[in-house]
Amino acid sequence: MTVSLGKFPDDEPEVLSSNYPTVFGLTITPVVGGILAAVTGLAGAGWIFLNLVQPAQQQANQLTQEVNDLRGRTEQQAESLRQIGAQQQQLANARAQQRVVQSFFASPATLDTLLLDINGQVRRVAGLQLQSYLPKESVIVTDGSLGEGVNNKLRQTPVFVEVSGGFNQTVALLRGLEQLQPLLLVRDIVVTAEPVPVVVTPQGQILPRPAPKLTTQFNIVALSPLTPEEQKKAEEAAAAAAGNQPNQGGGNQPNQGAGNAGNNASQ
């Protein structure tokens, strides 16, 4: 095999350089072209990122934030609706309890039939008689006798009752009054016993005395709730009465001092 040792193209730079284009005095060789292509690609990629990808990414992040905000507001609204529902249920339960409690109080209808109810309780007890029944004027509770919380919220209607009978009959009546539908208070009980004479036989034996007949007087107080309008008027009247009370911290001291000065001058 014969090998010819001739000159390689690398040994002729002038011939090689003449085969590539020249731009601004720079020969565009494959290496230089690759570098320029890489730089151009990087610049194009940067331009695409800055002008297309980054705005789209920012918009996507903004949309994601808006979605999260909407989701948060939706959850807050749902929680608010649940709390409103729970409060409405509590309000409904409170109103139901209020109706149950108010059913124990007296009403105009029960006050009209109170005499019949008491008379019926008296007739249920053998040997007991109703002697007197006298309704009194209704007044609004303002003195705290039933608790400060019910001032200007309840009306009390006293009824004077007098019955006569034995001790057991009187106790049975008082227990029967507790079973009546309206809420009643029994106050100011006064019991008077008729004297029972001592009976002595001719043989000097003292006979057992029968149980004395009792006359019992007491006041039955029927309680009834005020309407919202009546409560408002009662509270306004109480506030006005409290505002009209004179100051007792020394309002009369100037007059007393003037009077003492006049007395000293006259002396």
Image: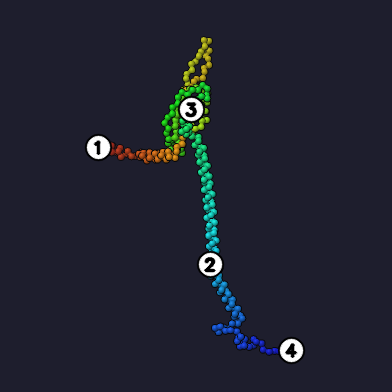
- Reading the image, the residue beneath label 1 is 265
Which numbered marker is on residue 86? none
Q: CA distance from mark 1 to mark 2?
A: 100 Å
Q: Nearer the viewer, mark 4 or mark 3?
A: 3
Q: Say which amino acid is labelled 3.
A: Leu
Q: Quadrant of the C terminus?
A: top left
Q: Earlier in the sequence, mark 4 or mark 3?
A: 4
Q: What x and y, as percent, mark residue 86? A: 53, 46
Q: CA distance from mark 4 to mark 3?
A: 149 Å
Q: What x and y, as percent, mark residue 43? A: 56, 74
Q: Nearer the viewer, mark 2 or mark 3?
A: 3
Give above or below for 214 relative to 111.
Answer: above
Q: Quadrant of residue 38?
A: bottom right
Disc 4 + disc 2, Cβ < 8 Å: no
| Residue 226 relative to residue 16: left or right | left
Q: Say which amino acid is labelled 4.
A: Thr
Q: Earlier in the sequence, mark 4 or mark 1?
A: 4
Q: Nearer the viewer, mark 3 or mark 1?
A: 3
Q: Residues within 10 Å of mark 2 (few under 14, many from 20)?
A: few
Q: Earlier in the sequence, mark 2 or mark 3?
A: 2
Q: Quadrant of the N terminus?
A: bottom right
Q: Earlier in the sequence, mark 4 or mark 2?
A: 4
- Reading the image, the residue beneath label 4 is 2
Q: Nearer the viewer, mark 4 or mark 2?
A: 2
- Reading the image, the residue beneath label 2 is 55
Residue shown at the point (55%, 84%) measured from the top left: 25
Which numbered marker is on residue 116? 3
